[in-house]
Every structure is written in structure tokens, then in C-alpha cells.
Image (spheres, rainbow, N blue to C red):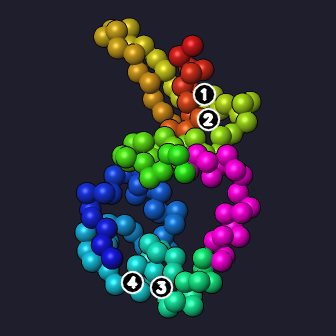
Amino acid sequence: FSFPAELMPPVLTASLRQRLRDSTPGAWAGRTLSAREAYEVGLVDLVGGDGDLEAEIGRLSLRFAQLRPQLLSTCHRALPAPSIDTACVVMGSLGAPPEDAIADNLVRLWLDGRTGVAHLQLHDPEHFNTFSPGLGRSVLKAVC
């Protein structure tokens, strides 16, 4: 199992941190890991034989059966994404918050009167500034 270091942009690194078991992506990025090592750090969910695989397929089938059809449709249509940027947009659209959940403190917009340059600052550290419908609505609210 190998995970090239060039596939480790900040957004992916932040997403992986939520999944990994007490590991830092930089510690193994660019190295080749055995299946057991990949499992131990949290990169794969199963290392086992044929019987284990069939049990896991059954478990996942039950899990998918409980998902909203709209979610599965979006995933089927948009994934795998052709780029990391597109994947971030798709992931951000999967769990849209209610319309009234626009946080005023996620975006700051100001105009530098001296230079005439407008600044748009994203501040959503909980989601690592990954663009999502909630952050998008906050941007719209700031600029409109």
C-alpha cells in the first residue's frame, strides 16, 4: 500500500486526520506500507481472508440500504471526482445544513480603502475551510 506525498494537500491531510488512528500523515506519506500497517494507521478498513471480505460486504450492504437515496444518487453521479477540488465541492454538498443555519462568523469581507482591494477571509476551522453549502451561504450573505 502506498500513498504518494504529492496527494497530501492541506484539505486531504485534514480529512485524513479525522480518520486516522493516532498517526500523522507525514509519517508515512510517500512510503510503502504493508496491508497490516495500512490497517493499523487507519488507511484501510479490512485486512483479512475471503470469509472476512464476504462478512464486510454484507455489513456495508446493510449500511448503504439505510442511506438516503439522494445521497447515493449524488455519490454515484459525481464520484470518483476528476480532481481534488471537485471532490471537496461534492463532499461539501452531501450534508447540506438547513437554510437557516447560516453562520455570520465564517466569512469576513472588507475593502482596503488605501489600495482598493477587497478581501474575503474564510474562517471555518472546524471544517478546515472546506467549501460547503453552509460556507457558501455565508459567502453570499457577506457579498450581497
Residue 132, visible in the rendered structure: yes
Q: Is residue 70 left or right of residue 25?
A: right
Which quadrant is the N terminus positioned in?
A: bottom left
Which residue type carries mark 1?
A: Arg
Labels 4 and 1: the sequence-earlier one: 4
Q: Residues within 10 Å of mark 3 (few under 14, many from 20)?
A: few
Are circles 4 and 1 on residues that touch, CB within 8 Å? Answer: no
Determine whether label 3 and label 1 are within 8 Å by CB: no
- The answer to whether the residue labelled 3 contacts the one labelled 4, judged by CB atoms less than 8 Å apart, is yes
Q: Earlier in the sequence, mark 3 or mark 4?
A: 4
- What label does residue 56 carry, if any? none
User: Residue at the location (74% across, 61% down)?
Assistant: 66
Q: Is residue 143 above or below residue 89?
A: above
Task: Kindly indicate whether the residue at mark 1 contacts the one at mark 2 (C-beta within 8 angstroms).
Answer: yes
Q: Range of the magenta residues? A: 58-75
Say which element carries label 3. Answer: loop
The amino acid type, in three-letter code, at marker 2 is: Gly
Circle nearer the viewer, 3 or 1: 3
Is residue 89 positioned above or below 138 on the image?
below
Q: Earlier in the sequence, mark 2 or mark 3?
A: 3
Cα gap from disc 4 to disc 1, whole angstroms: 42 Å
Q: Which residue is mark 4?
A: 35
**Looking at the rendering, in which quadrant would you find the C terminus?**
top right
Q: Which residue is mark 1?
A: 137
Tell me the crowding category of disc 4: few under 14, some 14 to 19, or many 20 or more residues within 10 angstroms, Cα based. Answer: some
| Residue behind mark 3 | 47
Point 51% across, 81% down: residue? 46
